[in-house]
Image (cartoon, rainbow, N blue to C red):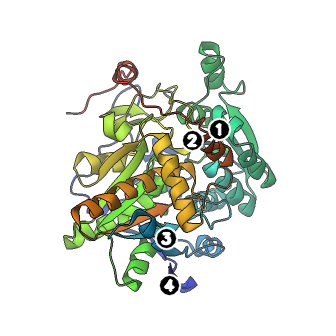
Amino acid sequence: MKNRKILLSEQEIPEKWYNIVHDMPNKPLPPLHPGTKEPIGPEALAPLFPMELIKQEVTTEKWVDIPEEVRDVYKLWRPTPMFRAYGLEAALDTPAKIYYKYEGVSPSGSHKPNTAVAQAYYSKQEGVRRITTETGAGQWGSALSFACQHFGIECEVYMVKISYEQKPYRKVMMNTWGATVHASPSNLTEAGRKILAEDPDSPGSLGIAISEAVERAASDEKTKYALGSVLNHVLMHQTVIGLEAVKQMEKAGDMPDIVVAPFGGGSNFAGISFPFLRLNLEEGRNIRCIAAEPSSCPKLTRGVFRYDFGDAVGMTPLLPMYTLGHTFVPAPIHAGGLRYHGAGVVVSQLLRDKLIEARAHDQVECFEAGVLFARAEGIIPAPETNHAIATAIQEANKCKEEGVSRTILIHLCGHGNFDLAAYENYLSGKLVKHEITSEQIAAALAKIDTPVID
């Protein structure tokens, strides 16, 4: 039997996170105060985040030390394995070599604990008693619940209502780790009540859930807010994935021509791709990094680059990003973790500079790819992950058409063991294609009343 698994030792867990901002040819534009429209400093973030995370958010240092206490928790599941996908290669009859880095071995079943543990640790160091957050599919909420339980911090989660209803066992997982979970929009916050007054049947969105969690954190000095994606410190914590992957590819005697990952706000895409982009920026390599997003929420492929709010109500600073508009509410597709209106600032700048690529897929195409992968490789991927698999299949088929061999690396950022209802809908023919119309995008963008970027 072919050797499929490429492992690292515990001693090879990275000791530092990689900050791509140091190497970017064009640095990200600054966040703006929502009232004055002037650039804000780190002090504006102090009500929401621990100071150490604020320092990481604004630093331009290339490497940031990972605290030993965080690395000790990482050892519960890191280093994560990489596999050569011989089964998928055979099913596609492609000359391409396909690998996947598997983050589903973490306690919560996804890549999210890589930053959840770090954020909970820094909060504990500063005496925080409670952390509030939002979650889409439930992977981030699960990860933060696990991390808060480990460090003895209360955790309050606002879960997008459609996912709260579609994925009840994610809620049970969070409750098991001691978290309190609310369906968002809720009646517990002014933001939630405002949304419900306008639309009592609102399915919710990550932007709405963020508004609720931010409001709760801002009202209590012993409570802080944690974000599972978008911000630079979050993306930086996730680079442990790509740093391990570079070592594993070297052990395999190979290096990817193409790296693909699903895209919601940017955390799992950044985690796998940024260390490979470092090789492009430092050594002049030409590794293509492709972000795969849903066609029902296509901010990278059909959005605009301008200042916008990170939440639905407008409580956050204005961020320069690719966006569909902060009031945009995506269709209730099963890839709940990708249903976010905007892209992280760093990823947005990289796309603007054409240093990365983006591609959109319909959910039926994605589940078709996920089922093929499950039957070929044995792992049932999360709906979010299926977007990256769909992109990889396109690239592998292109290799077959062109008669060339390229190496493709997929970020398998989580398993789909809690998403079987979605697979049941696909297998029974109930899952429908959905693509947002140009008119819907134009209507959402028309509601943005924020500074335009030249």
Examine the image and state in which quarter residue 162 appears: top right
Q: How crowded is mark 1: few (under 14 residues within 10 Å), some or many (20 or more)?
A: many
User: To which residue does mark 2 refer?
Assistant: 336
Pointers 2 and 1 in contact (CB under 8 A)?
A: yes
Q: Is residue 54 visible?
A: no
Query: How far is mark 4 from mark 1, CA to CA?
Result: 38 Å
Which marked residue is nearer to the observer: mark 4 or mark 1? 4
Q: What label does residue 87 carry, if any?
A: 3
Which marked residue is nearer to the observer: mark 4 or mark 2? 4
Which residue is pictured at 48% across the width and 38% down the height? Answer: 340
Which residue is pictured at 25% across the width and 45% down the height? Answer: 352
Amino acid found under the numbered disc labelled 1: Ser
User: To which residue does mark 4 refer?
Assistant: 3
What kind of element bears circle 3? helix
Pinpoint residue 353: horizontal percent, then vertical percent.
Answer: 22, 49
User: To which residue does mark 1 refer?
Assistant: 163
Pinpoint residue 358: horizontal percent, then vertical percent.
Answer: 32, 48
Amino acid found under the numbered disc labelled 2: Gly
